[in-house]
Image (spheres, helix red, strand yellow):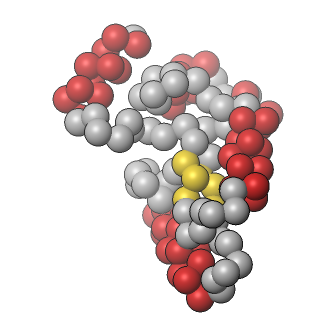
Amino acid sequence: MLAHRSRKGAPLATAIGGAIEHLTRGLAIDLAPVRINAVCPGLILKEDVKQMPEEVLRTHVVPLPMPRGGSPIEAATAYVYSMLNSYATGQIFCCGRRRLPGVNNRQHNSLDALRR
């Protein structure tokens, strides 16, 4: 998700994430009819994430549309979907987006206030 929102101290990770997304789209064009897709999983509750202090984890999940991290199984489902869908190519499947599409920042901040 760093490709969609930069964080202090993570410019390289942000650049790599953006490069992967553009590489996915470019390869989908060059290698058609082979399907090329990518998954952008967001915050997944792996063992290292579960060891984060509760207050740090909370700052990451409060802004999410579903205010929790995803399970590894939920992330795997996105990968399986991208493999089973025989029509999609050049797509970035995002799960656990930070912002809801069509929701402006003022509305989103109101949602954050309700979750606190």
Q: Position of residue 50 (x, y in %)?
A: 73, 28
- Dividing the picture into quadrants, the one containing residue 109 is top left
Residue 88 seen by the camera: yes
Left or right of 83 on screen, residue 20: left
Q: Residue furthest front?
A: 87
Number of labels in the image equals: 0
Residue at the location (56% across, 70% down)?
90
Left or right of 74 on screen, residue 22: left
Q: Is residue 44 above or below residue 84?
A: above
Q: Position of residue 61 (x, y in %)?
A: 52, 27
Left or right of 81 on screen, residue 60: left
Tell which of 116 and 87 is nearer to you. Answer: 87
Residue at the location (72% across, 35% down)?
74
In what quadrant of the picture does the C terminus appear?
top left
- Dividing the picture into quadrants, the one containing residue 92 is bottom right
Q: Residue furthest left?
A: 106
Residue 46 seen by the camera: no
Residue at the location (34% across, 11% down)?
114
Q: Is residue 36 above or below residue 80?
A: below
Residue at the location (46% across, 23% down)?
62
Tell which of 37 and 110 is nearer to you. Answer: 37
Q: Position of residue 95 (x, y in %)?
A: 57, 42
Tell which of 33 and 20 is nearer to you. Answer: 33
Q: Position of residue 66 (x, y in %)?
A: 52, 24
Q: Is residue 37 above or below residue 50?
A: below
Tell which of 96 and 7 is nearer to you. Answer: 96
